[in-house]
Image (spheres, rainbow, N blue to C red):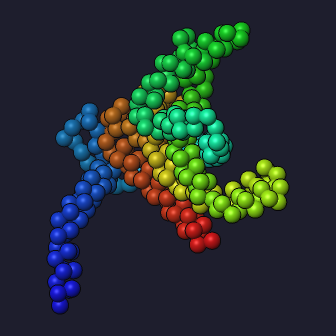
């Protein structure tokens, strides 16, 4: 009896926070769905009208949607490839007994704690500026013509900036996994004289399968929402992704209905991707 009362009191104690959290999520979502069914333009206030799924039809048939979706997928896959491959190599390097290893680890992890807006400003003005940037100076030093990254290769520039920020996260996760590798396996491989490549592909890489899957899941969810780097660098035209397209519809075209429909589409697509990734992780963990 006392146990049941304790459980009931516990449920009553957490009920207010659950209700507030539910309302915190459901009210904005419900309003977004409602606005997506309206013709709602900020330049024509007070003349909203119900149009059903017309905003969705317009958004999904707009050529800008397919370009933004393609940019989103390219950004996600490119950053994931750089993060996983580069993170694995850096993790293997940082696992070695090198001079100043702790300082090197701190420097490698530091970019992850830089805000996206600050990171974009640093890359835009200090590294990729076609006149005064570090890359321009290096290319001039060897007699080459500097590259205007944001005009010639806007999506590549965004990928480099985002990958620089997420590479430390993958490195940290994979380094932790490598350090948890069974010492007996390491000693057995050394005693058998296993070549470095064989040791990596048959011992280290299988051990990293689960951490790599976790990195893919977490990074994909965040990479689908990249916005600051595109907005700050002004590459929204050629390198704009789905979040930038929603921003463009809502705050530049003043089309709240179209932007709301785009937001719902982006949420649905992100949830579909997350669903399949979670299933993949589940199979991986069961294996």
The N terminus lies in which quarter of the figure?
bottom left
Seen at 77% across and 59% down, the residue is: 189
Residue 259 or 200: which is nearer the viewer? 200
Query: From this viewpoint, is residue 73 visible?
Result: no
Seen at 52% across and 63% down, the residue is: 278
| In-image side of 31 versus 236 (left or right) | left
Residue 230 or 286: which is nearer the viewer? 286
Seen at 40% across and 31% down, the residue is: 117
Q: How many marks?
A: 0
Q: Position of residue 68 (x, y in %)?
A: 52, 40
The quadrant where residue 133 appears? top right
The C terminus lies in which quarter of the figure?
bottom right
Seen at 58% across and 72% down, the residue is: 286
| In-image side of 234 versus 155 (left or right) | left
Question: Which residue, as the protein is rendered here, is positioned at the far bottom?
Answer: 1
The quadrant where residue 154 appears? top right
Residue 250 or 147: which is nearer the viewer? 147
| In-image side of 256 versus 127 (left or right) | left
Q: Position of residue 158 (x, y in %)?
A: 54, 32
């Amino acid at each position: 009896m006392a146990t049941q009362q304790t459980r009931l009191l516990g449920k009553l104690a957490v009920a207010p926070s659950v209700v507030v959290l539910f309302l915190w999520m459901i009210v904005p979502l419900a309003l977004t769905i409602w606005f997506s069914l309206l013709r709602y333009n900020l330049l024509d206030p007070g003349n909203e009208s119900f149009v059903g799924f017309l905003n969705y039809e317009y958004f999904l048939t707009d050529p800008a949607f397919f370009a933004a979706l393609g940019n989103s997928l390219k950004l996600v896959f490119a950053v994931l490839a750089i993060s996983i491959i580069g993170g694995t190599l850096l993790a293997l390097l940082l696992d070695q007994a090198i001079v100043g290893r702790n300082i090197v680890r701190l420097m490698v992890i530091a970019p992850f704690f830089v805000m996206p807006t600050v990171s974009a400003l640093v890359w835009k003005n200090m590294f990729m500026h076609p006149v005064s940037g570090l890359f321009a100076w290096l290319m001039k030093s060897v007699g080459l013509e500097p590259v205007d990254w944001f005009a010639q290769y806007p999506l590549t520039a965004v990928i480099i900036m985002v990958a620089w920020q997420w590479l430390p996260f993958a490195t940290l996760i994979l380094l932790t996994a490598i350090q948890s590798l069974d010492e007996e396996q390491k000693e057995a491989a050394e005693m058998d004289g296993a070549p470095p490549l064989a040791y990596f592909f048959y011992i280290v890489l299988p051990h990293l399968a689960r951490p790599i899957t976790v990195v893919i899941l977490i990074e994909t969810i965040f990479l689908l929402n990249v916005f600051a780097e595109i907005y700050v660098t002004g590459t929204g035209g050629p390198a704009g992704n789905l979040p930038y397209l929603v921003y463009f519809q809502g705050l530049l075209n003043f089309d709240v209905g179209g932007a709301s429909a785009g937001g719902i589409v982006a949420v649905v697509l992100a949830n579909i991707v997350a669903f399949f990734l979670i299933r993949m992780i589940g199979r991986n963990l069961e294996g």
